[in-house]
Amino acid sequence: PRPAALLGSWTARADGRPALRARARLDLDAPDLSLDRPQRLAVARPARMRVEVLGLFDQIAAVIVTDGDTYQVYDARSHDLEEGPVGPHLLWRVARVDLEPNEAVDLVLGSPRPGPALRSGGAKLFEDGAIAFVRLDERGVVREHYRFDAAGRLSELSRANPAGQMVWRARYADYRPIAAIGGGEEPFAHEVTLEFPRVEARARLVFERVALVPDLPDELFSLRIPARTGSPARGRATRGGPT
């Protein structure tokens, strides 16, 4: 019964993390993009995001926002604005991150929700008290792999497609206490490493400051750009998404 208890506790914690503001450093390594920049982040469930890529002296170099339905990408150097409906490969197109916005929000919050309609499979207990287990779909295909440390903190989670091929893996480390929304403190992983084997990409997010908040204003996830940027480009053609 321990996997079920761990997942139940983790889901309850996820329900208590609806949104956050943070400053972090993103190190991204993809076949055609390499990035190591500080970021300002604001995310809110289920799929609202604002990512400000910072340049020298904390000036904004680029901004990506989505309210879950539409997105905007602004390049401060060229003053170009792209916007349109959110598609399944949005973050891959603009940032080489093989995640849908709702997955990215969950992972940044440090509390990804378990996939629905899955059952727990075999579990392994390690000498240090950590426990690992898998969750399977109705066909017996492993769709999720979890590892929790002895304190019940998530240290690794991976997800696979219906064919059982891994789509992404997240590793959590450097847990430190931060202020909880309801008072007191709770552990928060200040280092998140993401691997995307389908596209041979890797990202590492190191948090410098984190604040959990009950909600964020809608206007934070929409850009109001001065007219000098010109007409926004909709559906700009780029390299296709991952298969």
Image (cartoon, grey):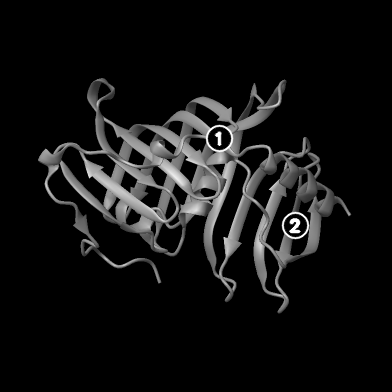
Please tell me which residue is depicted at 38% across the width and 59% down the height of the picture: 86
Count residues near mark 2 (Cα–Cα under 10 Å), then give few for <14, some for 14-19, many for 20+. some
Secondary structure at numbered mark 2: strand
> Between 93 and 148, which is closer to the camera in this rendering?
93
Q: Which residue is mark 2?
A: 133
Q: Quadrant of the N terminus?
A: bottom right
Q: Give how far across and how far down residue 85 sits, in percent.
A: 35, 60
**Residue 97 picture location, percent across and down:** 40, 53
Instruction: Please identify the quarter of the rendering in which residue 240 is found.
Output: bottom left
**Label pair 2/1, CB-CB below 8 angstroms:** no
Q: What secondary structure is found at the residue carrying circle 1?
A: loop
Kind of residue indicated by mark 1: Asp
**Relative to 116, residue 66 above or below:** above
Residue found farthest to the bottom: 139
Which residue occupies 34% across, 52% down?
71
Q: Which residue is mark 1?
A: 215
Picture layout, residue 164 above or below residue 185: below
Figure check: 126 above or below 40: below
Q: Which mark is residue 55?
A: none
Res. 78 in view: no
Picture coordinates of residue 61, whole percent (x, y): 24, 34
State the image coordinates of residue 51 (x, y, percent, origin top left): 38, 39
**Residue at far right of view:** 1
The amino acid type of the residue labelled 2 equals Phe
When asked about the image quadrant of residue 9, the answer is top right
Q: Quadrant of the C terminus?
A: bottom left
Label 1 CA crowd tier, 10 Å (few <14, some 14–19, many 20+): some
Query: Distance of mark 2 from mark 1, alpha carbons?
Result: 33 Å
Q: Earlier in the sequence, mark 2 or mark 1?
A: 2
Q: Does any portion of residue 219 appear in the rendered image?
A: yes
